[in-house]
Image (tube, grey):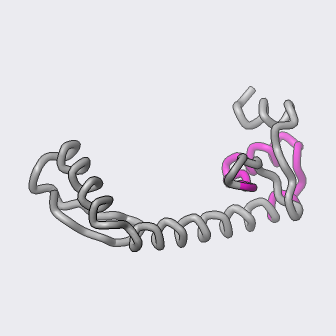
Amino acid sequence: MTYIEEKWLKGEYSILCGAVGISIKGEGFRPFNKESVKELLKKGYINEITAEATNKAYKEYLADFFADYTKNQANRTQEEINEQRFEARAAMGSGVKMVNIITGETYTT
C-alpha cells in the first residue's frame, strides 16, 4: 500500500470545490499533485471529474505558490540576502555561479 493510499483509506484528506487534497493547519488547502491523483484514479478512489478538478486546483496552487515565492524573494532584506549567499558559499565553495531557477536571480558565491 502506498503512502497516498494509506492516507486516503484513513480519511486523512479534504475536499474543496470538487478537488481532493490535504488541509494543513495555518496553510489551508493543498490539492494533491498529479501523481497522487493518477494513483487514486487508477485505484478507483476518485472519478475523472474529481481528477480534473484536483489537477486544475493543483495548477492554481502552484501558480500562487511561485508568485508568493517570487514576491518574497524580491522583498528580502539585505541581511537575508547576505545570509543566503553565505550559506550557498559554505555549501558550494567560493566562485560558483548560482541561479535561482524560479526568479532568474544570478550571483557568484
- Counting from the top left corner in percent of width and height, residue 51 is at 81, 58
- In the image, is residue 14 above or below residue 11? below
In the image, residue 29 lies in the stretch drawn in magenta = yes
- Give the camera-side residue of 62 and 52: 62
Quarter in which the C terminus is drawn: bottom left
Expressed as whole percent of the image width and height from the top left, the position of residue 75 reads: 41, 72
Taking depth in this image into account, of 92 and 59 the one nearest to the observer is 92
Left-right relation of 100 to 46: left
* Front residue (pair 28, 57): 28
> Residue placed farthest to the top in the image?
1
Spot the residue most to the left. Answer: 95
Q: Residue at x 24, y 59 (%)?
A: 82
Residue at screen point 82% across, 37% down: 12
In the rendered image of this protein, does residue 87 appear above or below residue 2?
below
The quarter of the image holding the N terminus is: top right
The answer to whether 29 is drawn above or below residue 91 in the figure is: below
Please say whether residue 30 is one of the residues in the magenta stretch: yes
> For residue 3, what is the image quadrant?
top right
**Image x and y of residue 80, in percent:** 32, 59
Residue 13 vs residue 58: left or right?
Answer: right
Q: Which residues are the magenta region?
A: 28-52
Q: Position of residue 59 (x, y in %)?
A: 66, 66
